[in-house]
Amino acid sequence: MRPVRLTMQAFGPYAGREVVDFRNAIEAGLFGIYGQTGSGKSTIFSAMTFALFGQAAKVEQEAPTLRCDSADEDLPTEVEFVFDIADKRYVVRRRPEQRRPKQRGTGETRDAHEAWLFNATGLTLDAITPDNPGKVIEEKKVALVGKAIEDLLGYGAHQFRQIVLLPQGRFEAFLAADTKARLAILRDLFDVSLYRDLASSLKADAETSERKFREERAILAGRLQLEGFESLDALKYGIVTADGDLRALQTSEDEQRARLKQSQTALESARVVEGLFQTTERAKSDLEILANKSQEIETIELRYRAAEKTASLLAFEELVIEAEQDLETVVGARTTAEERSVGAAQEAGAASISHQDEEARGHEIGALAREVETLARHQISLEKSREAAAAAEMADRKLTLARRTLQTSTDHLAALSKKRRDESEGLKTARLLEAQRLILERRLATLEVSLRLAENVEKAEQDVAVSLRQIAGLTDKHRDLASASSEARLTFDHAERRLSDVQALYLAQKLQPGEPCPVCGATHHPDPATGSVEHTRLDIAFRDAGEELDKLQSAERDAYTELASARGILSEREDRLAALERPHASSTELREGIATVKEGLEALGPAVDIQAAESDLEQLDQELATEETTNDKHRHAVQQAETEAASASTLLAAMLAEIPEELRNREMLDATFRTKQQVLARRENARRAAGEALAKASEQALAARKDLEAAEEIVKDRQQRLTKARADFALRLAQANLTEDAYQRFKSAIVSIEQDRAAVETYRREVHAANDAARRAEDAIAGHERPNLSLSRKVCAKSREHCNLHRVCGADAAARLSQLNKLLVELAETIERLDRAEAESGALRELAALMDAKNPFNLDLETFAIGAMFDRVLTAANQRFGPMSNGRYRLERAVESGGRGRRGLGIQVHDIHTGKPRPTTTLSGGEGFIAALALALGLADVVESANGKVRLDTIFIDEGVRESRHGKRRRHARSGATGPQLACQREPVGRANLARAAGPGSHS
């Protein structure tokens, strides 16, 4: 990407519209951007970054804050950037989110972020204008424009800041940084997250696998203990014992089930006979209910027959109603015709009066015509005086401009004098403060590095303390749950023994000499259990105790798992704390020291360029002499302009003498002329309209009288029709033997005729069916006696209770056997799976340890990857650093060893003169800058190659210049400029153009 032209409007410190043309600078190969501190050099980089990606050059700065606070509120913030990629030319235009005054009313409105991308290939730079930016690629939608630009460049905003726009102050800090600080900087410039994430993922997977194996084996042992077994062999013996108990209980349950079936058969027979007797009783009750409804049914039958007669007369009644409605409608129409006739007559009278009034005002039309003619003559005279007025106005503007120029020159002269005095005093103070500032800045950098180390250590110590508190709480929780589980086991065993004793007593009471025992089948009972059954709900207590035991055992297992996990986390945090480097003081002490240093820096005020201030003082003396000469010239020009303005004003007054004062303004004269013309036209139109309105009103009055006569005839016809309809309806009532009142009374029953008829027929069918049912029920109970159903139910319930007791005991025994068999299978499978998984994950855990710095070099994967990229950076940097230092210096990696910290990113300088390496801190200011510059260019080359298809035509370095090659600062030739300037050097550096933002008023 090569920049061609950048246009900034109301952007950063630029309140107006500023244009930066890069063509000459790009052709030179190496160029610089120079200006005073705060003059807007870095803003140029922010403008390019914002135009391309909608973001500022600084990541932390938000786009809406880029607007200039001193810009006109009606001037929108906008950036346009013209750039080339290979042989293609593109234009991107972007406006950030901003607020502007409302076009209507008061207050402000918000404009959203907008962007446009154009293809301007084939257009010269001068041909690219706001109205002709090229062919549209994307517009308005910010996301689409951003994606299109990233597709064109091959990188996004993050990569742009890494490989194209090299950030301010980063590279000299990078040159002098220690290994940890340099590693943090390289993380921002190289994307090594793949290696860091890979190592972290492998470490997490290995730790998870190892922790899982420990936890699962502990859970296996806990499950055996919860079931009361010490080993798998003890579990297998318990399964054999449980199987024998289950077989004995199943035999006893079969005998009880046979007795229950006999009692259920007897109960069912009793229920059938009882049902027959109940059916007979219901049939007799139904007959009595139907007999009570007979009178009601007769009334319903009389009602629906009368309603059938009434329904036959509905059509005649409807004819009467229709005739009444028609009469009412035509009477209303006749009333409307009468009102319309009266209104038409009144309108005709009013139109006649208006016509007479307009005829009486005919003399006013002539007077208006004469006034219009006079105004037309004034227009001709005023047109002839326009040239004289233009000359007078030009002379006045010239005089105003001359006076304003004189005032500006006078103000500027006074300001220069005051500035000369102020800068002379400020220069003395600045020399004293600059030495103090350098000492405080070095102290601040050292304290900030120590603070970051202290914060990391304190955070790790807090994490360890939190883990210790969690483990203490989880240990107490697990101990309490284990104790509660043991008590629940004792309660369960006690409930089980009591239930077994009660079951034995219950069975012993049923034993009879010579009859088989329901449990063992023996007919001889030498020693039966003795006692009384005092509690019949011990089975519920047994089940409740079992459920409580299961719940507590599950909670104990969960607590043990949680405790094991917390211990693993504590181990990780303790390892992380041990690996951290500890600073010489606490974070509180370091923050207090930083605050003290910053207060000292703030007390010193902003930095001042001493040499530039001295040069500026000399320049001010020259500007004062020049400005005094210019002021005298402006004063003479004002006197000459006053003479010319007086002559032009006298000539114009003579030409306008005949025209009234209030009509000498052309707009006022034209407005008066148009007003008089409009009044004349309205008077003529009103006279003509009055005659037309009189003729129309007369016609409407005649038509209204004819409509009224026709309405009278229709009313007479509708009255005759209504009389006939009423006579026909009265005749039909007499024929049906109905009075008017009876007709109205039975009319409401018409809707229920079918329902009433159906009710009568249904009643008759129900009576017949009830008689038949009563006869059949009497026949069914003949020869039967009513059974004692309550006694049969009690016998069956007792048999079911015995059967359920045996079934519950058998189900519990079967569940216990199934649980033990399932536990045996699960434990065997789990042990086999754990052995196999531990063997399979061994390689993973060994690889994770190697990548986590557990190797002979104490080097993790991320640092190793960055070190490999850093070797390439140093190689590329030395290709420039050698020629820059006349072959004296070469950058190389320092060999570090020992300790648990990261290593392998140290930098040292090999000095050819001495043949020995030495630290980079021993370089002079100029040597340090060219070393940092070489590192920056080398880093850009490596990042470009690492990003595949990215092509770098231009690289921007936002960095101030410290010293020239001769050890002296030199001032820009255009020192009076207020904004940044471009300067070129015809010496291309490498294959990419190099742009550099220089420090306050200086260049290399």
Image: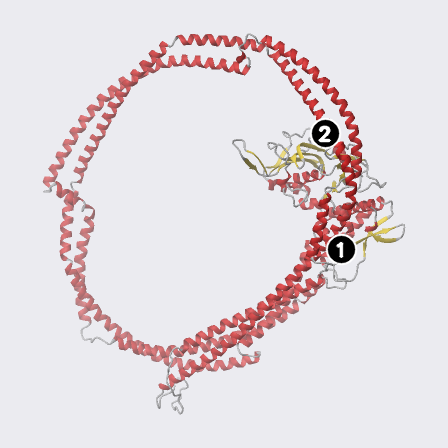
- Which numbered disc, 1 or 2, marks the residue closer to the eye? 2
Cα distance, mark 1 to mark 2?
Answer: 53 Å
Nearer-the-camera pick, 620 or 463: 620
Q: Earlier in the sequence, mark 1 or mark 2?
A: 1
Q: Is residue 295 left or right of residue 618?
A: left
Q: Residue at x 70, y 25 (%)?
A: 408
Where, by quadrant of the figure, is residue 51 drawn?
Answer: top right
Q: Amino acid at mark 2?
A: Ala
Q: Is residue 863 left or right of residue 368?
A: right
Q: Which mark is residue 611?
A: none
Please tell me whether residue 591 is drawn above or below residue 31 in the rendered image: below
Q: Residue at x 12, y 34 (%)?
A: 727
Where, by quadrant of the figure, is residue 627 drawn?
Answer: top right
Q: Amino acid at mark 1?
A: Thr
Please tell me whether residue 10 is drawn above or below residue 758 in the rendered image: above
Q: Which mark is residue 415?
A: 2
Q: Residue at x 50, y 16 (%)?
A: 671
Crowd rating for badge 2 (residues with CA inside 10 Å; few <14, some 14–19, many 20+): few
Residue 821 visible: no
Point out the image quarter for the N terminus: top right
Point out the image quarter for the C terminus: top right
Crowd rating for badge 1 (residues with CA inside 10 Å; few <14, some 14–19, many 20+): some
Where, by quadrant of the figure, is residue 735 drawn?
Answer: top left
Q: Secondary structure at mark 2?
A: helix
Mark count: 2
Please tell me whether residue 161 is drawn above or below residue 653 in the rendered image: below
Please tell me whether residue 811 is drawn above or below residue 211 in the rendered image: below
Q: Is residue 155 left or right of residue 616?
A: left
Please provide percent x and percent y for residue 776.
18, 68
Q: What residue does disc 1 label?
A: 179
